[in-house]
Image (cartoon, rainbow, N blue to C red):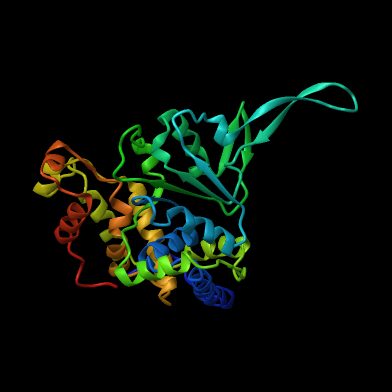
């Protein structure tokens, strides 16, 4: 069994891994002052931060999607920007635009760039599917290259930089489907469900009392960037890499040997970006679990949030009410983990 020629063998790396775990616990401790339950959702959001990926959060109104992301930005003391996506939103409303301004000293007019709300550390694209694809596309360059180009000039975004987008799965009137190219740039599709009764009771109790929340900033933006660099150093065995690529390739109906259910229900499978995010997410998950290597279980645990928005179902799947998660369950069964390796 071979691994990538990188390992956490330096004292500084081990110390940083310990800081990551301690920092995660501090972040969770601060979040619990305001956020009740939703542990799986919070875990996936934190993995997005540690990897440096963007995530889509899908859930009905009132489940604290916006509150969660805003609170994380406050806990990390990062610049937060919320963009309410509406049908009349223009690309320049997101990226910014050049304005003509007069110099009060010389009286000369010149073009000055006025940055838009995309210039933040954590950007919340609220109800992203309520704006036309032309405006949605204004996020593409920022999400992938962490920069913005306006009128031929390119402006770098401050690190760390994340886009978290929200969607309401039940209200489709006046919405626009996200282009596949944009969906593919989201690391996770995080589904947030209703809380159990005891947690919902605590939410109602807390939110109807006097609120006075003060957060301690135990982890900084600079720490997050360091954690992202550390995650990429976690070694992965060839067996785990091959399993991950095989899992993604098997989701494609055009692939030789694709299972019958994939050919029957899937129009397009996941791209190579899915395998990249599975590996990166698994590396972060391993560190969070106190391990310095990736296992098959890490990959399988992240298969649903990584793949559910990348496997495009066809008419037959829709008519038979086959969900993306059910497809992924069958995919995991169809691609067994090797008996040897991690």
Q: Is residue 3 visible?
A: no
In front: 47, or 248? 47
Residue at point 34% right, 38% down?
180
Q: Position of residue 302 (x, y in %)?
A: 32, 61
The residue at the far right in this view is 105
User: Left or right: where does residue 322 sit relative to residue 15?
Assistant: left
Q: How many numbered circles does the render carry?
A: 0
Q: Quadrant of residue 92?
A: top right
Q: Position of residue 159 (x, y in %)?
A: 60, 52
Quadrant in which the N terminus appears: bottom left
In front: 82, or 214? 214
In front: 271, or 95? 95
User: Left or right: where does residue 304 sit relative to residue 157?
Assistant: left
The residue at the far top in this view is 108
Q: Position of residue 177 (x, y in %)?
A: 33, 35
User: Left or right: where does residue 175 sit relative to residue 31?
Assistant: left
User: Left or right: where does residue 257 sit relative to residue 273?
Assistant: left
Q: Relative to 59, is 282 above or below? A: below
Q: Position of residue 34 (x, y in %)?
A: 49, 66
Quadrant in which the C terminus appears: bottom left
Q: Quadrant of residue 285?
A: bottom left
Residue at point 44% right, 30% down?
87
Q: Is residue 60 visible?
A: yes
Residue at point 30% right, 37% down?
172
Q: Quadrant of residue 219?
A: bottom right
């Amino acid at each position: 069994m071979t691994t990538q020629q990188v390992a956490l063998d330096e004292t500084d790396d081990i110390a940083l891994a310990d800081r990551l775990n301690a920092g995660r616990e501090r972040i969770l401790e601060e979040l619990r002052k305001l956020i009740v339950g939703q542990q799986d959702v919070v875990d996936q959001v934190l993995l997005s931060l540690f990897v440096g990926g963007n995530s889509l959060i899908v859930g009905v109104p009132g489940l604290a999607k916006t509150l969660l992301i805003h609170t994380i930005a406050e806990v990390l003391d990062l610049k937060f920007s919320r963009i309410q996506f509406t049908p009349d939103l223009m690309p320049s409303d997101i990226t910014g635009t050049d304005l003509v301004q007069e110099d009060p000293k010389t009286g000369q007019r010149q073009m000055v760039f006025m940055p838009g709300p995309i210039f933040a550390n954590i950007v919340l694209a609220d109800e992203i599917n309520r704006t036309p694809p032309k405006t949605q596309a204004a996020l593409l360059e920022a999400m992938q290259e962490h920069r913005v180009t306006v009128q031929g000039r390119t402006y770098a975004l401050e690190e760390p930089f994340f886009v978290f987008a929200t969607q309401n799965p039940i209200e489709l009137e006046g919405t626009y489907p996200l282009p596949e190219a944009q969906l593919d740039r989201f690391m996770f599709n995080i589904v947030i469900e209703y809380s159990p009764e005891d947690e919902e009771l605590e939410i109602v109790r807390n939110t109807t009392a006097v609120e006075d929340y003060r957060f301690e900033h135990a982890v900084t933006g600079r720490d997050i960037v360091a954690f992202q660099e550390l995650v990429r150093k976690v070694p992965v065995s060839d067996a785990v890499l091959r399993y991950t690529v095989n899992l993604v390739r098997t989701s494609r109906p055009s692939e030789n040997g694709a299972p019958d259910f994939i050919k029957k229900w899937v129009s397009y499978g996941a791209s190579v970006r899915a395998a990249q995010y599975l590996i990166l997410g698994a590396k972060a998950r391993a560190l969070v679990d106190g391990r310095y290597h990736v296992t098959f279980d890490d990959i399988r645990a992240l298969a649903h949030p990584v793949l559910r928005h990348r496997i495009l179902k066809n008419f037959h799947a829709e008519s038979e009410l086959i969900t993306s998660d059910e497809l992924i369950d069958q995919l995991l069964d169809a691609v067994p983990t090797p008996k040897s390796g991690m």
